[in-house]
Amino acid sequence: MNDLPVINKIESVYGKFFREIAQKFNLPLCNPGHGQETPSLDVFTTNYDNVIEEYCRSMGAQVCDGFKETFRGNYVFDVNSFPLAQADVRLHKLHGTVTYLRLANGQLDRTPIIPETGPLKIGGQLAFPELIYPGTHNYISKEPQLELLFLFKQALQRAEVALIIGYSFRDPNIVEILRCAVNRNKSMRIYVVSPSAKKVIRQRLTPQGLTAVPIEKTFERFAPGTDLR
C-alpha cells in the first residue's frame, strides 16, 4: 500500500480510534516519546490487508504479528513472540495475511510491492498468499490459525471488554470460541460496531446465547470516548 491519499486517510481514521481507545481505558502507549497515543493492545482481525501495519509504521509504533525472520528473506511464525511484545500492538490475523507469502520451495517471505499484472515472484520463485476464505471451516488445525485461535480464546477469557468492529460472525469457529469464552468470563461486555449491528446480533449471536451492545455506526463515525458506556 503506497497510495498517499489512502495512507493519510488511514492515519486520520485509525489515529482518532486508537487515541480515544487509549484515553477511554487508560491503556499504556507503544511510543509515548513520539507523542502519538497508539495503545499497547491485542487486535484480532479476519482482514487480510496491511492497514494496521501501515498505520503503526507511519506513527512509529511497534507491531508484533507473530512472524520473525530466521535469516534474510525467510520468516517463520513464532507464537511465543506475542507474550514478549507487551509494549507493542499485538496483531493476530486469524484468516491469514497478504504481508507474507509462501514460496514454491515452502519458505515464507515478506510481500514486496504487488505487480499490477502478471504473477508475483520473489527471487525468481512464484509466491502465493495463504488466506482463509469466507465459508471455509476446516482450517482450525492449520498453523498458525490453530495457535492464533487459542490466543484469541485466552484473551477473551481475561478481557473486560470485547470490541468487535465491522464483523459479520460468519465463521462458526470464531463464534464458538466467543461463546466458550463468555461461559468462563461472564463479566466481559461485548460491543458490536456496525451499521447493521442489531441485525447481526439477532441473527448470529442471540441463537448462540450471546448478548452484545449494538453500536450502529461505521468505523469512521465510531467514537469510543462517547459510544462505549
Image (tube, grey):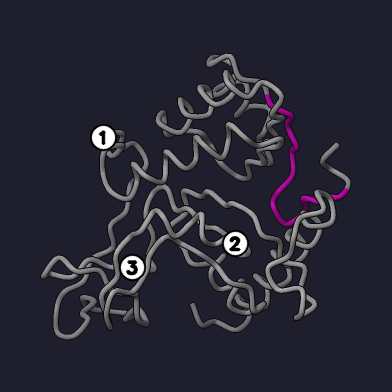
Number of labels in the image equals 3
Task: Residue 17: give x, y in percent of width and height.
Answer: 74, 58
Task: Residue 175: give x, y in percent of width and height.
Answer: 48, 28
Quadrant of the image for the C terminus?
A: top right
Mark 1 or mark 2, which has the lower sequence index? Answer: 2
State the residue at coordinates (77%, 54%): 21
Mark 3 or mark 1, which has the lower sequence index? Answer: 3
Which amino acid lies under the numbered mark 3 shown in the image of this protein?
A: Tyr
State the residue at coordinates (31%, 34%): 137
Q: Hey, which quadrant is residue 128 in on the image? A: bottom left
> On the image, numbered disc 2 is attached to which residue?
89
Which amino acid lies under the numbered mark 1 shown in the image of this protein?
A: Asn
Find residue 7 and name its label.
Answer: none
Q: Are marks 1 and 2 in contact (CB under 8 Å)?
A: no
Find residue 138 and name its label.
Answer: 1
Mark 3 or mark 2, which has the lower sequence index? Answer: 2
Does 10 lie within the magenta span?
no
Q: Is residue 32 above or below residue 64?
A: below
Mark whose residue sits in front, 3 or 2: 2
Which amino acid lies under the numbered mark 2 shown in the image of this protein?
A: Val
In magenta, the rendered stretch is 212-225
Task: Residue 118: give x, y in percent of width and height.
Answer: 22, 78
